Amino acid sequence: MSRNFKILLLLAAIGIMLIIRRFAIGLGASTALSDGYPLGLWIALDVVVGTALACGGYAVALLVYIFNRGQYHPLVRPAILTSALGYSMAGLSVAIDLGRPWNMWKIPLYFRNWNLNSALLEVALCIMAYVCVLWIELTPAMLKPSRITRFLDRILVWIIALGMLLPTMHQSSLGSLMLLAGPKLHPLWNTPLLPLLFLITCLAMGYAMVVFESAISRRHTALLAVLQKIAVFAGIAFVALRLIDLALRSRLSIAMHLDLYGIIFWIEIVLWLMPAMIANPFRGAMCIALAGGLYRFDTFLVAFQPGPGWHYFPSVSEMFISIGLIALEIAIYIALVKRFPILGGMPAQEHSRVAQAFQPAPRHQETT
Amino acid sequence: MDIDRRSLLKTAAAAATLTIIPAAEARERRVAPSDAVGLLYDTTRCVGCKACVVACKQANEMAPDVDGYGGGLYDAPEGLNEYTKNVIALYREGEEQSFVKKQCMHCIDPACVGACMLGAMHKGAFGVVSYDAAKCVGCRYCETVCPFNVPKFEWSKKAPKIVKCELCRHRLAEGKEPACSEVCPRGAVIFGRYADLLADARERLAKNPGKYVPKIYGERELGGTQVLYLSHVPFEKLGFRFQGEEAVPHVQQSVQHGVYKGFAAPVALYALLGAVMFRNRRRGDSDE
């Protein structure tokens, strides 16, 4: 075990102990949450930002299967793994954050009580389903061929299609969540376009994360320039939409008012535009991940104004649980890519064949 | 062949846009249910005796809140919280002062009800915004969206519930009125049918020109509330942050219903994704 891996395990262990403590002493004693700020770091960072950073699988799948760019196929499997881990950790964060997690099973099963007006219900159901879809997509890489894998292989097209439908739905609905908090949201962030803006940010962040990871693992670097361009373009589209929307609703003057909110707003905008001027894809991708992360975090926490007298800054426990979960995620990722054929990619001649998309990679490296 | 796919995607995008835009205007303003009841509170009659606060605690078997003033000696809530469903606040600025009663407003079109996944928060009998812990997962999204910051969470408990005024619905079921209005010695808060309360409030405004701010808070605000307020000081000063008339769920549900009308768009998108993938695969096969 390398030293870095040991540090990851240590952080994860601290996180897990604090999670046990949270259930032992309750939410009030272990968090800085309050009736004014009932949602905090775990939701804003681990779920709202975390799942967007885990949208690499969604973004690359769109590129490969819908826009038929087979050359990106080697990126699919590592991206799906990152997504599966990211979404699983987000699900775990929700379970820790919920006050009454023992009622969680009722969300999918009490379908007669479903409130179809609730964007949160849609987010919850879609994320539950998507976590399953992501792990199913990984089974060909992780299980030995059997009757189950052969069956999954046959229906894989429809599972992959589901793997693109579900993020489209719940990532936009994450934006709708704060639309319902409308009056309490700062006017620079409160717009009917929230669902669309959230969808664009998750795609940009998804592509950026694929670039980021590939650059770190020094694989498939030749493919990254185009992904980076897509992310940069999404960022510019995001900024244009946001500014036009504010202008049309006569709110640009609020942005010109350089208080805390105005300054944060412009930091977001600059972070989105900067990657267009950064040649290094690694740095550009980091910038986009940061821009999207900041926008989503701000929408849920910074721009949320419950009224005078309420303050929130995460407790040490909250922070170390978030850090622990991220460390755990990275540790599991490292362990899995060492054990299973994930990073190697697929043979070149099978690029556009969907059904064979997730066949285990051969021992030799790709021929291209 | 590329044109094929592009035109397909364009058609889908156009269809999606077309379904969103008309639906966004379709959601109608809700009206109070026919059996709606509520409260009418009048700042000019309230003397701040807090009898209603005590009565509310007794009727709802709430624990005393000793966290605030008095070092553990007094049940003195500083505001609505997990021990307190009803509270009297004081606003004072120079010569001007007013008490104000705080409890759930029982919105006609409540944000909390729109937020709740399984209907733990729902509009029950008499239009009372009611809570059912059995369907609650403790996500606190109702707290996040409430424009009046009414729902509170039992932060101190390991099996926490949401705490909020339910207009003493257990007493309503027995034919009694809420505890707060029953004990009020000055008639500052009265209970009644929503329509009667509204008529009463209008009459007081008409008969006493200059006594009140010429507005019944809750008649139109945020889609209307079943608890109505008359005040001699501006409502903003009493902590009513929002004066708009649009119900909070209006925008979100218009967008949501536009996109998910009859669940047609997701099904269409799913079919489209599958179809494009099949086509891509066929082309991939024939290339070899």
Image: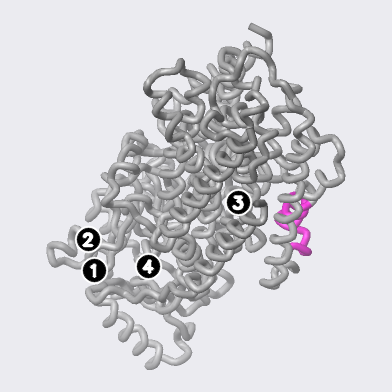
Disc 4/disc 3 C-alpha distance (Å): 29 Å
What secondary structure is found at the residue carrying circle 4? loop
Q: Which residue is mark 1?
A: B126
What secondary structure is found at the residue carrying circle 1? helix
* Mark 1 closeness class: few <14, some 14–19, many ≥20 residues within 10 Å: many
- Which numbered mark, 2 or 1, is in the foreground of this view? 1
* Mark 3 closeness class: few <14, some 14–19, many ≥20 residues within 10 Å: many
- Which numbered mark, 3 or 1, is in the foreground of this view? 3
> What type is the residue that disc 3 sits on?
Phe
Disc 2/disc 3 C-alpha distance (Å): 40 Å
Q: Which residue is mark 4?
A: B107
> Given contact means CB atoms under 8 Å apart, are the residues at marks 4 and 3 in contact?
no
Position in image of residue A23 (x %, y %): 40, 28
Position in image of residue A185 (x %, y %): 58, 58
Q: Which residue is mark 2?
A: B169
Q: Which residue is mark 3?
A: A198
Q: Chain of mark 4?
A: B
- Confirm whether circles 2 and 1 share one chain: yes
